[in-house]
C-alpha cells in the first residue's frame, strides 16, 4: 500500500483555528485508562467540551518523559492488559468524532511492532501520524521514509536547550507542527509554564516553523491563555488524566473532564490578542 502525500490534517486544522483568531487546545490521554472503552468515552467528552486535536498515548513500561500522574495511568493501563493494537482501535473510534488524532509513542514499541507494519496500520485506523518524544530526526530515517510513503504526520520535539542547528533540523523534518517542550524534564502540572516557552516558540519560528504548539506544564485556563498568546496550540495531558484518576465513577469522570476541558478551552479562546 502506498499513499500519495496529502496535506496534513493536523496542520490544516491548526491553520483553520488560527484563522479564527485563537490557538488550538490539544488534549492527551493514555490508551487503556481507565480501560479501553473508558479512554474512548473520555476522548469523546473532551472533544464535545472543546478539545480540537487528540493525542492518544501508547502505554509503555519505561515512560522516561512522563510525570507521576501520567505514569500512574500508564501503569494501570498496562496492568489491565492494554496492547499496541488497542491504540489503533482507540484511534479509529476517536477519529470518528471529527477531531484529528495523533498517536504519541516512545520509539521502542514501534520498532518492536515493525515500522513497515505500524505505518499502514496507523493509516487504516484513521490517525494523522505520530508524536515521538524520544526520537530525533537524525535517527528517524526509517520513520521519515514510512511517513512519507503513507502520508503521515511526524511531530518532533524541541526544547529550551536546542541549538539553532538542532531547531532547523527538527523543523525541516517535522510535518503537522513542531512540539515545543516548554521546560526541561518530565511532564506534569506546574504552577507556572516557564519563561523559556515564549522564547523557544520564537526561535522555532525563526528556524522556519509555521506551526508551533507548546506542551509540558499547562494545567489551568490562565496558563492556557498565557501560552495561547504566542503558540498555535496548547498541549495538555496531566490535567485531563488527573480528572480520570480522581473520579469516583464514570459519571464523575465525565463531569470532571467536562469542567477541565471547558476551562482550558476558554483559556485558549481568550489568549490571542
Image (cartoon, grey):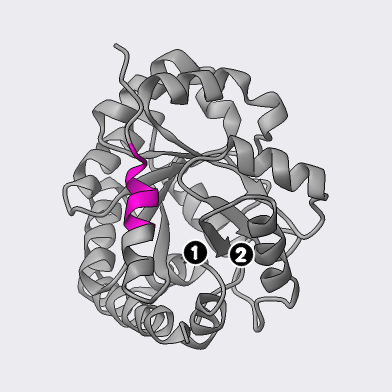
Can the viewer see residue 215? Answer: yes
Residue at the spot of label 1: 235
Image x and y of residue 51, in percent: 32, 67
Tell me where the magenta segment starts and ends, as one range: 7-14
Whether residue 10 appears in magenta in the rendering, the answer is yes
Residue at the spot of label 2: 216
Task: Please state if 114 lies on the left or on the right of 173 as rendered.
Answer: left
Residue at the location (61% across, 71% down)? Answer: 217
Whether residue 272 appears in magenta in the rendering, the answer is no
Can the viewer see residue 248? Answer: no
Main SS class of the magenta portion in the image: helix
Image x and y of residue 194, in percent: 71, 76
Work out whether 121 lies above or below 17.
Answer: above
- Badge 1 crowding class, 10 Å Cα cut-off, few under 14, some 14 to 19, many 20 or more, is many
Question: Considering the numbered disc 2 on the image, is that residue within a helix, a strand or a loop?
Answer: loop
Task: Please state if 38 lies on the left or on the right of 272 as rendered.
Answer: left
Residue at the location (26% across, 32% down)? Answer: 125
Work out whether 142 lies above or below 41.
Answer: above
Amino acid at each position: 500500500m502506498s499513499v500519495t502525500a496529502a496535506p496534513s490534517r493536523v496542520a490544516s486544522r491548526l491553520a483553520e483555528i488560527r484563522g479564527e483568531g485563537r490557538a488550538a487546545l490539544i488534549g492527551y490521554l493514555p490508551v487503556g485508562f481507565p480501560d479501553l472503552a473508558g479512554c474512548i468515552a473520555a476522548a469523546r467528552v473532551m472533544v464535545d467540551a472543546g478539545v480540537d486535536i487528540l493525542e492518544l498515548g501508547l502505554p509503555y513500561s519505561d515512560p522516561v518523559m512522563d510525570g507521576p500522574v501520567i505514569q500512574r495511568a500508564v501503569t494501570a493501563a498496562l496492568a489491565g492488559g492494554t496492547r499496541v493494537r488497542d491504540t489503533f482501535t482507540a484511534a479509529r473510534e476517536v477519529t470518528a468524532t471529527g477531531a484529528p488524532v495523533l498517536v504519541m509513542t516512545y520509539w521502542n514499541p514501534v520498532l518492536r511492532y515493525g515500522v513497515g507494519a505500524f505505518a499502514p496500520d496507523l493509516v487504516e485506523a484513521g490517525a494523522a501520524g505520530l508524536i515521538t518524544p524520544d526520537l530525533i530526526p537524525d535517527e528517524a530515517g526509517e520513520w521519515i521514509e514510512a511517513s512519507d510513503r503513507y502520508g503521515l504526520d511526524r511531530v518532533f520535539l524541541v526544547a529550551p536547550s536546542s541549538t539553532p542547528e538542532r531547531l532547523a533540523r527538527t523543523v525541516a523534518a517535522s510535518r503537522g507542527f513542531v512540539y515545543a517542550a516548554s521546560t526541561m524534564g518530565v511532564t506534569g502540572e506546574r504552577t507556572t509554564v516557564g519563561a523559556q516557552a515564549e522564547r523557544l516558540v520564537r526561535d522555532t519560528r525563526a528556524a522556519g516553523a509555521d506551526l508551533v504548539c507548546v506542551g509540558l506544564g499547562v494545567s489551568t485556563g490562565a496558563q492556557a491563555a498565557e501560552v495561547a498568546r504566542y503558540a498555535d496550540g496548547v498541549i495538555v495531558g496531566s490535567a485531563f488524566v488527573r480528572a480520570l484518576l480522581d473520579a469516583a465513577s464514570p459519571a464523575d469522570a465525565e463531569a470532571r473532564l467536562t469542567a477541565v476541558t471547558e476551562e482550558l478551552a476558554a483559556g485558549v479562546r481568550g489568549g490571542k490578542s
